[in-house]
Image (spheres, grey):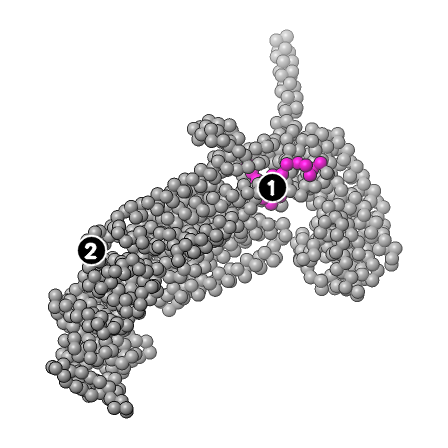
Amino acid sequence: MLAATDLVIDIPERKSGTPLSFDVKAGEIWGILGPNGAGKTTLLHTLAGLKKPRAGSVNLNNHNIQDLRRKQVAQQLAVVFQNNGEGFPATVLETAMIGRHPFIAPWDIETADDLAIARQALQKLELSNLESRLVSTLSGGERQRLAIATALSQSPKLWLADEPSNHLDLKHQVQIMGLLAEQADTGCGVILCLHDLNLAAHWCDKILLLYPTGEARWGDANAMLTVPALERLYDQKLSMISSEGQTYFTPISSRT
Amino acid sequence: MGRSLTLVCTLLLGSVLISAQAHAKVCVTDDSGAQLCLPKTAQRIIALSPGATELVYAAGAGDKLVAAVSFSDYPDAAKKLPRVGSYNRFDQEAILALKPDLLIGWLSGNPREQLSQLQTLGMPIYYSELRSFEDVANSLERFGKLAGTTNTANTAAADFRYGIKKLRERYTKASEVSVFQQIWINPLMTVNNEHIISEATRICGGVNVFGDLPNLTARIDNEAVLAANPEAIIAGGMGEENHDWLKDWRRFSGLTAVRKDNLFFIPPSTLQRPTPRLLQGTTLLCQHLDTARGRR
Amino acid sequence: MAGAKSNNNTTSLPRFFTPLLVLFVFTLGTLTLAITTGSVHISNQELWQVLHGGGEPLHRTLVFELRLPRALSAFAAGGLLAVAGALMQVLLRNPLADPYVLGLSGGAAVGALLAMLSGLSAAAVSGSAFIGAMISAVTVFGLAHGTGSWTPTRLLLTGVVIASGWGAAITFMLAVSPSDQLPGMLYWLMGDLAYARSPWMALTVLAIISVVMLPLGRSLNVLARGQMQASALGVSVRPLEWTIYISASLLTAFAVTTAGSIGFVGLIVPHMLRLVLGNDQRLILPAAALAGGALLTLADTLARTLIAPEQLPAGVITALIGVPSFLYLLHRSR
């Protein structure tokens, strides 16, 4: 679905890093891990076609994403941003409806179908009762869920989400990750930037490690998630625990 | 016989036509150089500046005025005239509703677009712009012609010319007095030699210390006045009685004009409006300058 | 409550239709008031006669030569400014933006004042104003473009600085101009419809741009969320922003050329509409054209009749009507 070929992302004032070549296939959940400033967000934006790479290319269904019209891309691919900034005042429902934009021709208006899709998305994210509320009155977690609902109304085949679990309480974290896994099960490709190692370990099939130097490694999750590799990534001592068939990583600090 | 009859008839017809023309049309040249012709003498006049109002009254046509702009306060009868706005923005509807047959516009003071709009709607406009004493006399004569009050108007013009001539003769040999003509206080403003006030000054044997400035009216600062050190300072004020501007100069005790107490007041409407009352203002100005000469 | 109306019938046209119909009726009302009101009283009967080709010549002149062109010019200028203001607010994602924030009115003023100082005709003054506005638009655009990517912040900053520059130039010209020219210059700066003549150019531009904006309305809604978000949702951000910028510049240039720099309308009308109608640009833009036009027509009618025969500048009345109205709406919307 989405393929990176010798991709070098463009971070100003940083030397070019490892060229990335990987394929995101239907049903796969990819996790991009790295410390702050490694360039996870830049990579995600480049994969979404929002930023030009320094070298190499990103291909969406075998077309160079830079050559496609934004509308075509948006019909396939949804992005969940890390910061959902202050726009003009809007209601929750209006915001969710925005996700239908790529499918409505300029001279058309939203149909009942579009409305239904948006409402369904809100329902899945348990936001239905907040339909008429102004976005500015929502909590951080509710806004995050709204961003995901908006992406859901886009009915994308590819999800690119930047720290989707931010601001969310435990229950909703699980709910979101479950939703994304469900999407993958129905044939979508999912790419996530995560800073929570354990979420990555639990939910991702493939991992891409992005080092602050620009170096990168990628592959199957169990191959990538090794203590030495992660310790080098985060510059932090870690210990790995197995429990009930699941692997967990915790940082080791001087107090333990 | 037949030919001479034809000739006589043609001549008769011709002279009838010509005299009909002569009675029908009244033509003058206005201050913009344009020719203005009315089908008959004006009976409903609107004056679009206070100065024009005064001139119309002086020309004997005051009873033909149907409206004026604000601040038309001389003569007293003018205060009762209906208003059509102010000189820099008038109410076109009010003007049209009064069905005037002559408008007296102020070329540099009235808004050009409103005048041109009125002209497009068929209003005859006399463009007035007075820069000299002779212009005042000419205007009186022209208004008299337009309004059919030539006797009064020509007499007024003649009196005016005579009065100015007498003043000129009287002061032609008088020794020069350097004068600062103040026309406003904040900002401090004066006039150059082209202004009618400077002509008045010259008639009285004075010389405008700022006469060579490029602009007709100019903003200057106190320093310029101190540097020029005029022998006399002439000012009007806010209103016909207010001497504050002159009092303000007393703090500069170094000025010749202050030391000799040559701070003279002239009611602004007699010197700053281009009307027959300029004669009064100029006479007063000449008297002041004589006083200054006496204090040397 | 903003958005409450959109709850159950987001998809149906009546949501757009009703408010626009109301505004349209209001507009007709203000235009009618403008034609029937003035220093000279024209009764409804007499107006009827005039509109049917008859009536007294004086009344015909008043209605067709004075009142109608002036009312249409006021409507055009008000509509142009309100739409330009709404577009600027979306482009800059800043509710404080108005059509003049990027220096357009300053450039126009400099052009107009220079023409006045040179003694040129009224048509030349209007033409200069227009050229001045466009020069300002191109300058700001070019400067903000800078290193290839301009953000709203950069555009705003550049615009504000250029506007200040124009302001200084205007002050300078006012300071050195001959004093008999001052009143004319000041009236232009205050915004005045006494001189407005042919409204057809302005009305045409308003109509054309409104039509151009129709299919773009929804994209504008998306753009209002942010450049990245909009791009991710399929909006071609850069071309859209250019379109908005050029449209807003043209709208403002024509408005200022028609009526001088009338303030307040471009800033407040979009806000007032948003408080009542929500944030859908597909509704706000046409509503702004109608509401802005009606407001200015009403204000101008008052300006020329309130203390007749003395005439007031229309911009003063717009503020007098608009400020309390806006505060009331703001209070009620809490």
Nearest the camera: C277 or A82? C277
Local secondary structure at mark 1:
strand
B207 or C279, which is in the foreground?
A: C279
Indicate whether residue C61 is drawn in magenta: no
Residue at image coords 78%, 43%: B279
Q: Quadrant of the N terminus of chain A?
A: bottom left
Residue that mark 1 sits on: B85
Q: Name the residue under label 2.
A: A116
Q: Label 2 amino acid? A: Ala
Taking C166 as reference, is C281 left or right?
left
Q: Give the range drawn in magenta.
A: B77-93
**C287 is higher (above) or lower (below) than A51:** above
Quadrant where the C terminus of chain A lies? bottom left
Q: Examine the rendering and report whether any part of residue C237 can be seen.
A: no
Query: Where residue A152 sits in the image (x, y, percent)?
Result: 21, 63
* The disc label shown at residue B44, or none: none
For the residue pair C314 and B178, the one nearer the viewer reads as: C314
